[in-house]
Image (cartoon, rainbow, N blue to C red):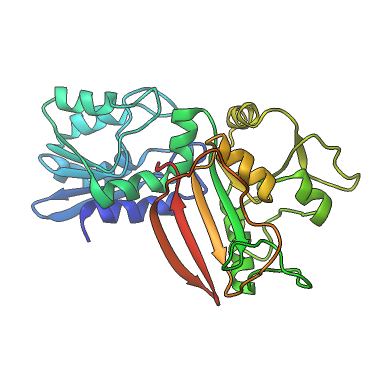
Amino acid sequence: MTPLERALELAERGRGATRPNPVVGAVVVGDGEIVGEGWHERYGGPHAEINALAAAGDRARGATMAVTLEPCSHHGKTPPCVDALIAAGIARVVAGAQDPNPEVNGSGFERLRAAGIEVEVADGELGFLARAQNEGYRTWAAKGRPFVTYKVAATLDGRVTLPGRRWVTGEASRRLVHELRAQADAVAVGMGTVRADRPLLTARDVDAERQPRRLAFGSGPLPDDSELELRTGPIELELGRLAEEGVQSLLLEGGPTLATAFLAADLVDKVLVVVAPTIGGSGPTFVGELPEPIPLSRLTSQLVGDDVLLTAYVHEP
């Protein structure tokens, strides 16, 4: 395992505790061995770099720091991390990704280089993993909207319903949906799904730190017993409003109408298709007609029970 891979592993320890800040991990390497580790443990607390430097102590002088995200160069809840790296005598920084936050966005690297510290930014698979680790934060910071993931369960021929059956996919895939909800800041469907299924959209029977905001896009009205928030404005405007309210990630569970609207507006970033080992033969497909084909990247597959989860990006983070 490389120091940057270890830093990525450490960063995950802060998952759920650093919001709205990203998760970050850092490792200090001196004389060929790790002499200090740290991660951003909670919002408002010391950043990963500071914790790693504290663990390294005097051994940080002349050492290399591997950190998953560009060190900050501005005063926020804490002082700039670049000042601490310079003062500690770090000689080289290997960063997983540049910070898209306009308050940083390369200025941390510039400060380090101006102080004579060598800076290397990861590319290839490690660079992608570092960006993907904070994909919600990156889109929220750079584009002013949440990172949108479209999740759909479908048959092998793309149908989203099966005659006489409530579920298209199996129990393991349905549990995965609840895990995805627990990880998202918000979950949304369209009014067609609201009227047909009366969904709760809660994360159930999984380890959920908190419940996501539950939204319905459309003109309404919502049923009297619905606990969903109705969002009636244009999609792009509503996404901007959600971002202003701190929503960094949105899980889209709507039917074909809502999915097609988001895709046609180029507002989907990642697609998750859970494919059941069934040919439906009839019924609606998971997306309607689009103005043009949408190329996808980084397609992966994995078994979930008897189903297959296909994951791909429309917009890489």
Q: Position of residue 41 (x, y in %)?
A: 43, 46
For residue 101, what is the image quadrant? top left
Please give the name of the residue rendered at 31% of the width and 25% of the height, measured from the top-left corner: 73
Q: How many numbered badges does the structure rendering display?
A: 0
For residue 223, what is the image quadrant? top right
Position of residue 85 relative to residue 306, above or below, is: above
Please give the name of the residue rendered at 57% of the width and 49% of the height, measured from the top-left corner: 150
Q: Position of residue 93 (x, y in %)?
A: 19, 39
Q: Which image quadrant: the C terminus?
A: top left
Q: Residue furthest bottom?
A: 306
Q: Which image quadrant: the N terminus?
A: bottom left
Please give the name of the residue rendered at 63% of the width and 27% of the height, measured from the top-left corner: 241
Position of residue 108 relative to residue 20, above or below, is: above
For residue 237, what is the image quadrant? top right
Q: Residue furthest right?
A: 224
**Which residue is more in the foreground, 254 or 124?**
254
Residue 25 visible in the current orientation: no
Q: Position of residue 185 (x, y in %)?
A: 60, 44
Q: Is residue 130 left or right of residue 186?
A: left
Please give the name of the residue rendered at 66% of the width and 50% of the height, measured from the top-left corner: 256
Residue 219 visible in the current orientation: yes
Position of residue 281 relative to residue 27, above or below, is: below
Q: Is residue 225 left or right of residue 112?
A: right
**Which residue is more in the foreground, 37 or 210?**
210
